[in-house]
Image (cartoon, rainbow, N blue to C red):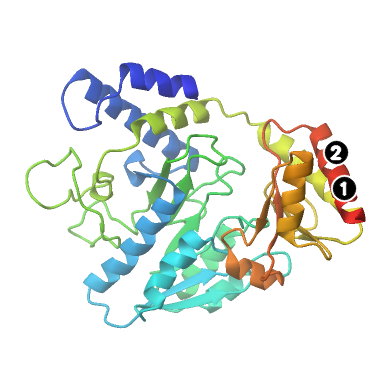
Amino acid sequence: MGEMMVDFLNTRAGNPGRGGHILARAADDTIEEARFKIAKLINAPSPSRVVLTHGCTDALNLAIHGVIRAAQIAGCDAPVKIVASVLEHNAVLRTLHCYQAHDAIELITVECDEFGRTDPSHLAAACNSDTAMVCLTHSSNAMGTIQPLKEAFEAVGKVAPDALTLVDSAQTLGHVPVDVQAMGIDLMAIAGHKGLGGPTGTGALYISDKAFPDSCQSRSPRIYCHRRGGTGSKAPGLEMPSQLPSALEAGTTNAVGFAGLIAAIDAADPGVHDHEMTLTAQIIDGLNEIDGVTIYGMPGIDGRTPVVLFNLDGVPSRQVADTLDREYNIASRAGSHCAPLAHIALGNGDDGGIRVSPGPTTRAHEIDLFLQAMRKIGSK
C-alpha cells in the first residue's frame, strides 16, 4: 500500500479532473479505478453511484445532512421523521441530534435485545408512510453484533415504501459480504481504513437510484448537496453538476489515499476474516473462563465481527485498558466507544467496556498472552 502511494506521489500527483495534462489525467484514472473497485465490491449498479469521501463519518454526514436538507427544500414544514437503532455510532447520532435539538426532525430510536440485535419487526413498527429515512448500522462498533439488514429493510418497505435506508458499513465491509442491491440499501457509508485495510482519510457513500435518480427530470434528488466548490467536470457557472458522482463531490479528492486503497483492495486476503474469527473464538472462550468477566453481544462467533466487548467486575474499564497497555504492552480500548445509546441498552452506560479485536497479523500466542494478563488483572 505504501509503495503504491509513494509511486502516485512520484509519477501521478496531479489534481484529478482539474487539467488536461498527463499528471491530471493519471490522477483522475486513479480516482476512477478506486470508484470502480468499490462499486464492484458492494455490487453497485454503476461506479458513478459511488461518491468518494474523506472517510465514513464524512459519508454519513453527507447522507444525513443531504436527506434532511432536501426534505426541507421540498417544502416539508413538519419535522422530518427519521428512525434509527440505538446501536448507531456517534457519526450518526450526533449528526441527527444537531437537528433534533432544534425540532427539525422527529427521531425515533429502536432498542436492541440483550445480544445487541435489532428486531426487523420493531424497526418496521417505528416507521410509517411519512418516514424519510431509516438508519441501521451493519454491525455494532462496540460489541460486533451483525444486524439483519435484508430482513429489516424488507419489513420497513412494507410500511414505509418511500423511506430511504442508510447503512454504516464501517465495521463490516472487508469482513463480510455486502450487496447493496440484494440488501435493499439506498445509502451506505464506507470506511477505507478499517476492514478494507486502506489509508485513513478515505471513504465513500453509495447512493441508489431511489435516493438520486439518473434523470432529475422525472424525480428530484433526495439528497441536497450541502457542500459546494470546484468539481472539474463543470467549470463555468455557479451551480453544482446535476449528475453523480460530481454532484456530491466538491474540492480536491484525496487521490494519494485512494491510490493506497486500490492497493489494499487488490492485496486483500480472503482468508484473513476466518483467521480473525478463529482468534475471536479463542478470546471469547478464554474470557469465559475468568471469574468476574462479562462478555457483551453474541455468545459465540456466529453473528458477530472480530470484536469482543467485556468488563471485569469491580475494575473500571479504563483501568483495565491502562494496565494492559502499561504493564503488558497490549493495545485495547475502554469507555463508551462513540456509541452511547448502545452502552445504555447493554446496561454499562456509565463505564462502557473494554474492547479487543484481533487483526490480520495477530497470532494465537499473542491471544494467550492477553488472556494471561487478564487472569492476573482479575486476581488482584
Image quadrant in which you'd find residue 353: bottom right
- Rounded to the nearest angstrom, the CA distance separating label 1 from label 2 is 8 Å
Spot occupied by residue 171 in the image (x, y as percentages of width and height)? 58, 49
Amino acid residing under circle 2: Asp
Task: Indicate the secondary structure of the residue bearing disc 1.
Answer: helix
Amino acid residing under circle 1: Gly
Query: Label 2: which residue?
Result: 368
Instruction: Pick out the residue farthest to the left.
Output: 236
**In terms of depth relative to the viewer, which is nearer, 103 or 147?**
103
Query: Label 1: which residue?
Result: 286
The reply, left or right, for residue 123 in relation to residue 59 is right
* Picture quarter with the C terminus: bottom right
Image quadrant in which you'd find residue 319: bottom right
Cβ–Cβ below 8 Å for labels 1 and 2?
yes
Q: Identify which residue is drawn at 40% across, 28% down.
A: 259
**In terms of depth relative to the viewer, which is nearer, 154 or 65?**
65
Can residue 277 be seen in the rendering of this structure? yes
Image quadrant in which you'd find residue 334: bottom right
**In terms of depth relative to the viewer, which is nearer, 361 or 373?**
373
Can residue 297 be seen in the rendering of this structure? no
